[in-house]
Amino acid sequence: MASASPFSKRPLSAWVEDLQQAPSPDDRYRALLAVICLGTGAEAVRWCCHALKDADSGVRALAAKQMGECRRRADVLKAGETEAWDRVGDLLAVCLQDADPDVRFEAARSLGTVRPQLSDANAVLLSLLDDEGTQPLMTAIVVTALAERPDKSAADLIPRFQKLLQHSQAEIRENVTAAIAHSKPIAAALVSELTAALEDDEPLVRENAAISLGVSGIESPTALEALLTAEQDEDEGVADAARAAYSRLTGDTGS
């Protein structure tokens, strides 16, 4: 697999040297990508830990992101090596205070895998969601990251998701309607908003809204009527999702 990599023309040791000594942030960024690609899982973890202290925020963000990816790989560190992952968690926790929002976000997201019980990571994600300066693409990704956290709070997310369902950016509405399906209490609290979203201009928003309504468990007459209408949607994905949601809520498999 390594032979097919665009980084394989140079040995791993050369890339490690670049990561440690290259004056250009772009070169260090590329070197970290190469080390992750060419090295073993344990080597990737080691050098990501090193890169978390890089002077460039882009390199730090990449390193923080890759920590979460590494934790999911079976070949990196055995499940019993808790001490090693505790060190990784400590480093990521420090990055929650980074001056760069991208670094804070990537650290918080990776901590959801490395140390999911750390409430500080959840707080950082919420702060990014509340920051009006956060770019729409980042907001959309933060929404998904929050929905996937095991310590998510319906009380924290319901008012924020309610507001974001009205966002002008379709990608944010798409991610929010999808995120709501991760939590029955949140879906139940936002039935009215999800029902309205069945008439969104974007098909994926309508489809996700239908799925989340099915998760809600609430047999709202207005929502059920809207789902029946949505079964005739010109988009096949929306129609199928509405049909499945209606059946889930009513037990009517013949609708």
Image: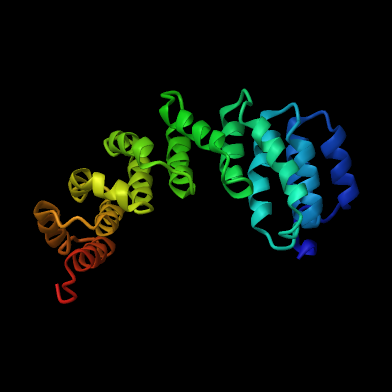
Left or right of residue 179, residue 191 in this image? left
Q: Quadrant of the N terminus?
A: bottom right
Asked whether the viewer can see residue 182, the reply is yes
Question: Which residue is drawn at the image coordinates 69% and 53% (left, top)?
Answer: 70
Question: Which residue is drawn at the image coordinates 45% and 23% (left, top)?
Answer: 133
Picture mark count = 0
Query: Compared to 191, does 122 lie above or below?
Result: above
Left or right of residue 196, residue 13 in this image? right
According to the image, what is the colour scheme of the structure?
rainbow
Q: Position of residue 113 (x, y in %)?
A: 60, 49
218 vs 99, nearest the viewer: 218
Left or right of residue 9, residue 51 in this image? left
Q: Where is residue 216 in the image (x, y as percent from the top left)?
A: 26, 54
Asked whether the viewer can see residue 201, the reply is no
Query: Compared to 155, does 251 lie above or below?
Result: below
62 vs 215, nearest the viewer: 215
| Residue positioned most to the bottom | 254
Query: Compared to 34, does 52 lie above or below?
Result: above
Question: Which residue is drawn at the image coordinates 56% and 44% (left, top)?
Answer: 117
Q: Position of residue 180 (x, y in %)?
A: 34, 49
Q: In which quarter of the image is the C terminus?
A: bottom left
State the image quarter where residue 27 is shown: top right
